[in-house]
Image: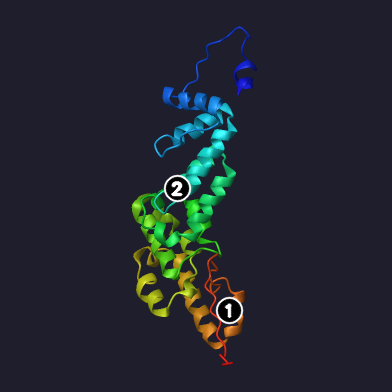
Amino acid sequence: MSALFTRTSPPEKTVFDIPGLSPEVMQLIIEFAYTGSVSVTGENVQELLLAAGQLNIMGVVQTCCDFLGEQLCPENCIGIFQFTGICFLTELQHKAYHYIIDHFEKLVVSEEFLQLSLQQLTDILGRNDLNVRKESIAFEAVLRWIVRVPEEREAHIAVLLSKVRLALMSMDYLRINVMSNELVKNNIKCRPMVREAIATMCHFMRNRRSHLCNHLLRPRLPNAVLLAVGGLNIPN
């Protein structure tokens, strides 16, 4: 940290102005310098992390990252993920991103979900390990994201729908909920996607061996998979 103050300042200078740093956070950093420990809370972690990064105090940075990693939940994981992108905290960003993938069903109802960018949501929906029990959850998540700012987001329906594995839905859901949706019906790029999904499903009924080669039918494989094995129980 000393290099931060001495590199471009005359040696006789003893008073420094550090913009954006509150007295409370400065006190925590000074205490860390003497004790090697710091008190991190939900109220101070963001400011403390930014200050520690600015001052290159990696011990405090790591403590803050550990704290945030332990606090991950469906209500805050997206905010933490986006915050780490600003601060270039690769390890915590990776942890938050995989939390999003693993808990997608729970976080789609959160307010933070609606703050995802188009690119972020597209990347998430495109992942093979996205944890959804039914593909309809991915489709309904797209609709919820669009409804938040329809005048800006309706134009993205085709891009997002292309990441939803329509052929993994039931035929009834596809016809009743997807084909009848106004956004899908009114977009010239969406209608062929639905027709292709139906054709793929019909083909699969006739030739089940080919489904793994078709991206529309490729199942999601989340990290947590329950494997059930059955066999013959032979008494001793």
Q: Is residue 57 visible?
A: yes
Nearest the viewer among 133 and 150 is 133
Q: Position of residue 37 (x, y in %)?
A: 52, 33
Q: Residue at x 43, y 78 (%)?
A: 170
Q: Which residue is mark 1?
A: 211
Q: Is residue 122 visible?
A: no
On residue 71, the disc is: 2
Mark 2 neighbour density, 10 Å: few (under 14) some (14–19) many (20 or more) = few
User: Is 161 located above or below residue 98 in the figure?
Assistant: below
Q: Position of residue 31 (x, y in %)?
A: 50, 26
The residue type indicated by label 2 comes to Gln
Color theme of the render: rainbow
On residue 22, the disc is: none
Q: Residue at x 59, y 33 (%)?
A: 58
Which secondary structure lies at badge 1? helix
Mark 1 neighbour density, 10 Å: few (under 14) some (14–19) many (20 or more) = some
* Image quadrant containing the N terminus: top right
| Mark earlier in primary sequence (2, 1) | 2
The residue type indicated by label 1 comes to His
On the image, which quarter does residue 173 sit in? bottom left
Q: Position of residue 231 (x, y in %)?
A: 57, 88
Nearest the viewer among 136 and 3 is 3
